[in-house]
Image (cartoon, rainbow, N blue to C red):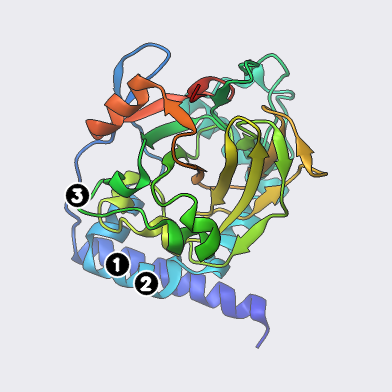
Amino acid sequence: MKIGKIKKKHLFILLLVIIFGLAIYPSQEPGPIRYIDRQTGELKTEKVAGEKWLVWLYNNPVGEATLATLVKRKFVSSLYGRMMDKPSSAEKIQPFVKEYRIDLSIAEKQEFNSFNDFFTRKLKNNARPVDKDSNVVVSPADGKLMAWSDVSDADFLIKGYRFDVYSFLHDSILATRYKDGSLIIIRLAPNDYHRFHFPVSGTVLPVTKIDGNYYSVNPIALREMADIFLLNKREYTVITNDRFGKVVMAEVGATMVGSIIQTYVGNTVAKGEEKGYFKFGGSTVVLLFEPDKILIDNDLLANTQKGLETYVLMGERICVAVE
């Protein structure tokens, strides 16, 4: 039997399990996902793409079994990613744009060949101004941010869980630099701009790739599995900067993320320069800083302490160098 037929068979079985599971086991609804819009200061409630699906996977016994056996695996996300590359997927664009009120006027183009072509769209040059101050670190992406001055105190959505920098980097020597350093996480929802950029200028080492699963990075999932960042596929680069030391920038895959694509070339990069993009799905960028190198902006720390993410835009200031 050909591999393609096997994958289609698995997908068909998955759909049958989902339908049966939804009918037999109603899921317990989690609380709403609230965040602060940094531009307006408003407290908002996130409209989650595929919310019922996520709730079922992470709050339902049949869903959890499906997640463990099929959904977390690469072939499911890869198969869906390839579907989003097909010309027929373009019919999903306008309903998606309308439902999530996406502003396409800031995109370089408004017509797309597939859903992934739309999903990985570039923005016009002036759409995301980059803070050029050499003492400033900028957000590498549009997304919802949480920040901790000391990674050893990074208390996630489940109280008592700590971010394990050694497991995350799979490099004990490198991880030692960050065990008491600062941690910033930017979560990209499916309706966000999905290209990521360098937060500081400097020289870079080759990308390190770590194989893993494809769990969702949405808070609905993190409330049930706080160690998702240590389980998912990820890639990271070390950026060396005179003011900020060695900065780790990592991209973490998630459910239905077709691929993490690195687009930069060479070993010298500029702040705000494109580093790469995610194909379809929600995803995350993680930044690690050595101790005593940065001061994270107070509003970001305060919101995190309240258990709230802060919506930020690529290019805006998120922290400064320690003088």
Element under disc 2:
helix
Are discs 1 and 2 less than 8 Å apart at CB? yes
Numbered tag placed on residue 64 in the rendering: 1
- The residue under the point 37% across, 46% down is 151
Q: Amino acid at mark 2?
A: Ala
Q: Residues within 10 Å of mark 2 (few under 14, many from 20)?
A: some
Query: Residue 270 at x, y = what percent?
Result: 73, 30
User: Which numbered disc, 2 or 3, marks the residue closer to the eye?
Assistant: 3
Instruction: Look at mark 2 in the image and give the residue it sits on.
Output: 68
Q: Is residue 316 above or below residue 225?
A: above
At x 74%, y 25%, the residue is: 109
Q: Position of residue 34 (x, y in %)?
A: 27, 30
In what element is the residue under mark 1?
helix
Q: Position of residue 137 (x, y in %)?
A: 55, 26
Which is nearer the eye, 125 or 147? 147
Mark toward the start of the polypeptide (2 vs 3)? 2
Q: Amino acid at mark 3?
A: Lys
- Quadrant including the N terminus: bottom right
Real-space Cα separation, disc 1 to disc 2, in angstroms: 6 Å
**Which residue is drawn at the image coordinates 47% and 30% (left, top)?**
294
* Marks 1/3: CA–CA distance: 21 Å
Residue underneath mark 3? 159
Q: Is residue 182 left or right of residue 242?
A: left
Q: Is residue 130 visible?
A: yes
Amino acid type indicated by mark 1 = Glu
Label 1 vs label 3, nearer the camera: 3
**Label 3 near label 1: C-beta < 8 Å?**
no
